[in-house]
Image: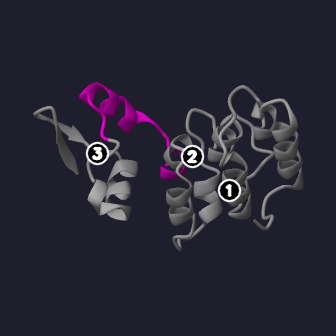
Amino acid sequence: MLAVVSETLVPLTEYQSLCSLWNPEKKAAGLYAHSKESKQDLKSNKTVLHYAVQDVNLPLLKFFLELEMPKPSKLVNSQAHGNTALHMAAALHHESEQEEIIRLLLKHGADPSARNLENHQAIHLVQAGETGDQIKKLLKKGRGILV
């Protein structure tokens, strides 16, 4: 799928294409202004879940996770540059929806014991403080927990 951005054809990423299907009135939202960024994006191993977490887009994350698909835990635990969507969610410091995103990923089979390229688990990326302590407890409970 291609989009016209500043009179240049720019390939839409998988995430952007699915966003436009999910929210058709905002098809152009989230398009990159420069084709260079889009080319880099196409080379990424990020899944739609990585992008939804990165954008702190809880409704879209729920939409993707609730789609019926074979082996959903494989998608949930896919790594992009070594990080799972759960790693990215754990690093969303000071985001109001961080805990709910982590709960949702765990409910759908995210593996809190997965390690990234730096050998860190998601729990190692959580911020310090009271909120961080709550999230660490949640991650220690493990995958498959109820929301």
Q: Which mark is residue 119?
A: none
Quarter of the figure with residue 84: top right
* Residue to which mark 3 is pinned: 12
Q: Is residue 72 above or below residue 132?
A: below
Counting other residues with Cα less than 10 Å from the Cα at mark 3, is it few (<14), some (14-19), or many (20 or more)?
many
Question: Does residue 31 appear to the left or right of 144 in the view shown?
Answer: left
| Chain part drawn in magenta | 31-50
Q: Amino acid at mark 3?
A: Leu
The residue at the far bottom in this view is: 68
Cβ atoms under marks 3 and 1 closer than 8 Å: no
Q: Which mark is residue 105?
A: 1
Dot 2 or dot 3, earlier in sequence: 3
Question: Does residue 63 appear to the left or right of 39 in the view shown?
Answer: right
Residue 69 image position (x, y, % from top left) = 53, 70
Residue at 65% over, 37% down: 92
Residue 106 image position (x, y, % from top left) = 73, 57
Dot 3 or dot 1, earlier in sequence: 3
Residue 63 image position (x, y, % from top left) = 51, 65
Residue at 26% over, 47% down: 28
Q: Amino acid at mark 1?
A: Leu
| 49 inside magenta stretch | yes
Cβ atoms under marks 2 and 1 closer than 8 Å: yes
Helix, strand or loop for disc 1: helix
* Residue to which mark 2 is pinned: 53
Residue 119 image position (x, y, % from top left) = 76, 29
Helix, strand or loop for disc 3: loop
Residue at 39% over, 35% down: 41
